[in-house]
Amino acid sequence: MWKSIGKYTAIAIVTTIPFVIISANFGFISGAPPNVVTIFNSSIFILSWILVSLIMGYIKGLHFLIFIALYWSVLLGISFVVINNPDAPLILLPLFFMISPFYGSEYFLNLSIELLLSLYASLFIIICFLGFCLKKVRYNRSKA
């Protein structure tokens, strides 16, 4: 199980870091309004996580489902602390950047980042669960 957590964390980081770099260079740090690049970045980031959630939910099942629920819960908690507490510990800031790819969609959907992150985290967890269920249905059909 612990080996799996390391692999899942690596998958999450590899899926997220390129989008963090793009969003950091196109307005997240400077506070500039999102542009076409940040909207495209957010869209591809969300689609990437949907695919990762579905595929890993199908392949790895319950272990990845638990991981993804914990991963997004931790990021959600950290974002709440950092956004609502200007004196938040600096150690939380690198993890806070993991939500920066949502910057483009936050601006145009006119939702708070907390609400938006909660909705997306729920979406990724539900899609992972669907992948898990698809595998169960396929397995049960092949047994019959």
Image (cartoon, grey):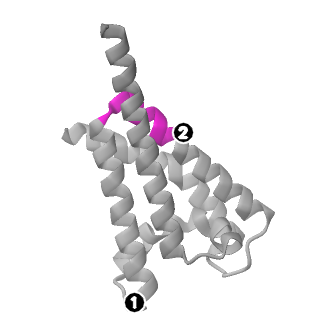
Task: Choose mark 1 or mark 2, whichever is in front.
Answer: 2
Depth check, front residue: 123 or 50: 123
Q: Is residue 106 something one can see in this rendering?
A: yes
What is the tally of numbered marks visible in this picture? Answer: 2
Number of the label disc, if any, that sits on residue 129: none
In the displayed structure, does residue 85 sit left or right of residue 38? left
- Magenta stretch, main secondary structure, is helix
Depth check, front residue: 11 or 53: 53
User: Mark 1 sits on what residue?
Assistant: 85
Indicate the position of residue 75 as horizontal and vertical percent values.
39, 65
Whether 57 is among the magenta residues is yes
Helix, strand, or loop for circle 2? Answer: helix
Whether 86 is among the magenta residues is no
Q: Could you tell me the amino acid type at mark 1?
A: Asn
Indicate the position of residue 110 as horizontal and vertical percent values.
66, 76
User: Residue furthest toward the right?
Assistant: 36
User: Residue furthest toward the front?
Assistant: 144
Q: Quadrant of residue 105?
A: bottom right
Depth check, front residue: 109 or 34: 109
Q: Quadrant of residue 1?
A: top left
User: Residue furthest toward the left?
Assistant: 1
Question: Does residue 45 sit above or below 6 in this rendering?
Answer: below
Number of the label disc, if any, that sits on residue 51: 2
What residue do we see at 48% from left, 53% from top?
123
Q: Residues within 10 Å of mark 1 (few under 14, many from 20)?
A: few
In the displayed structure, does residue 70 sit left or right of residue 121? left
Helix, strand, or loop for circle 1? Answer: loop
| Residue stretch rendered in magenta on the structure | 51-61
Q: Could you tell me the amino acid type at mark 2?
A: Leu
Please tell me which of labels 1 and 2 falls first in the chain.
Answer: 2
